[in-house]
Amino acid sequence: MLPRIAELMGRCGLGNSVMPPTELYNEGWMLRLVLDWFERHREVTSPLRFETGARWYSEALLPSQFKAQHRGDRRAESFTHADGVIGQFDIQPGERGATSLRSDASQFVVCEAKLGSALSPRTTNSADFDQAARNVACMAHMIGAAGTPVTQYRQLAFYVIAPDAQITAGVFGQLVTRDSIRAKVASRIQGRS
């Protein structure tokens, strides 16, 4: 079956294509190829360099601090779908990607891939809590749940992987600044957003 899938995907964008090229040429697959390359080239110095024992996973589910407080809680969140995660973590069996940090983790990197779109400026249940802030809040929650001191990590990062033209044009602008993320997470914790 895998050779047949590869043949069908290889036809994307050609005259004999049976599906749109975006099934293959999209930000999810581009990020997977980038992470695969860095995993196989660990000697390369880069912010996406893999630490010893690190792995990657696509579409990882990051648990949220903001679980339902009561039945019908309209502000509650479940998991955040991370486009990519690098580090020392486990994927819970049978949980479709539920992620938890290992006690010996020294690297925790979350990547969001954007080829032609912006970050979401809000989440479903909180108008002032954006996609970048939500990812970072989930990361902080996971570190706390692991019970590991932040000083144990050699790398903690949230990256938006995007074409230079988008970055230069300021598409992600204020949403990815430390001050914006800090303020929005603090506001969400205090229940204002």
Image (cartoon, rainbow, N blue to C red):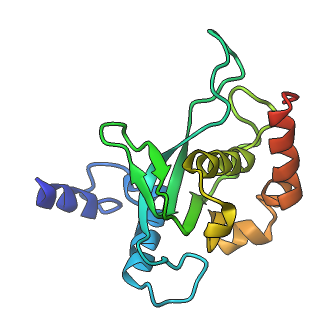
Q: Which residue shows up at 66% across the image and 12% down it?
A: 70
Q: Which residue shows up at 83% across the image and 60% down it?
A: 177
Q: Position of residue 76 (x, y in %)?
A: 66, 24
Front residue of 107 and 9 = 107
Q: Is residue 89 visible?
A: yes
Q: Is residue 11 visible?
A: no
Q: Position of residue 68 (x, y in %)?
A: 64, 20
Seen in the picture, residue 95 relative to 72 is either above or below; the reply is below
**Looking at the rendering, which quadrant does residue 32 occupy?**
bottom left
Q: Which residue shows up at 61% across the image and 78% down it?
A: 47
In the displayed structure, does residue 60 sit left or right of residue 186? left
The total of numbered circles placed on residues is 0
Q: Which residue shows up at 67% across the image and 18% down it?
A: 69
Q: Residue furthest top?
A: 71
Front residue of 71 and 119 = 71
Q: Position of residue 145 (x, y in %)?
A: 58, 45
Front residue of 121 and 22 = 121
Q: Quadrant of the C terminus?
A: top right
Front residue of 149 and 26 = 149
Q: Position of residue 49 (x, y in %)?
A: 52, 79
In the displayed structure, does residue 127 sit left or right of residue 40? right
Seen in the picture, residue 135 relative to 84 is either above or below; the reply is above
